[in-house]
Amino acid sequence: MTQEKQFGDDQNFAKGEFEGFLPSEDSDVPTPKQSFAKLLPTREPIKHLLIGSPKAVTGTIHYLQVIGYANVGDWSQLLPTGNPDEVMSILIRQIVVS
């Protein structure tokens, strides 16, 4: 029985001994998960909108593929704008923001 008291006392001592090393709930010390997340770059969407004649929009989309910016298949289909002989196409990309 004496051993049980000593064991219980040791647990209380150990808990108090490590309290200074463990962050409290309201501390500003980041957790390992938060620290890792800060190392990752922040990404956000950016939207490109091409508006013009079907020939101009299609030509621009193909040119952007030739220079390696975006694949033709990444753009939306040509959508009418409501103006005669005018269409639009949209591309949404994720970019790194620092």
Image (spheres, rainbow, N blue to C red):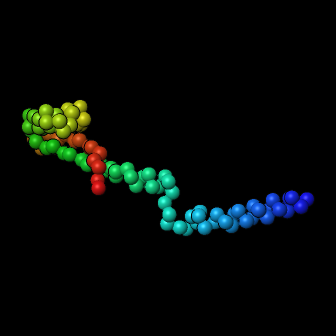
Residue found 29% across the figure and 56% down from its top: 98
Front in this rendered view, residue 25 or 16: 16
Whether residue 98 is visible here, answered yes or no, is yes
Viewer-nearest residue: 23 or 5: 5
- Residue nearest the observer in this picture, 37 or 23: 23
Circle count: 0
Q: Is residue 96 left or right of residue 55?
A: right
Q: Position of residue 82 (x, y in %)?
A: 16, 43
Q: Position of residue 51 (x, y in %)?
A: 14, 44
Q: Is residue 42 left or right of residue 25?
A: left
Does residue 37 appear left or right of residue 47 in this picture? right
Q: Residue at x 89, y 61 (%)?
A: 2
Measuring from the top left, give residue 88's x and y in whole percent. Answer: 17, 41
The vertical placement of 91 against 28, above or below, is: above
| Residue farthest toward the right in the current orientation of the protein | 1
Tell me where residue 75 sits by quadrant.
top left
Evaluate whether residue 85 shows in this view.
no
Instruction: For the N terminus, give its image quadrant.
Output: bottom right
The answer to which quarter of the image holds residue 21 is bottom right
Q: Position of residue 68 (x, y in %)?
A: 17, 36
Query: Which residue occupies the foreground of this view, 87 or 50?
Result: 50
Q: Compared with residue 49, is residue 1 higher up or lower down, i.e. above or below?
A: below
**Residue under the image location 59 percent in, 63 percent down:** 22
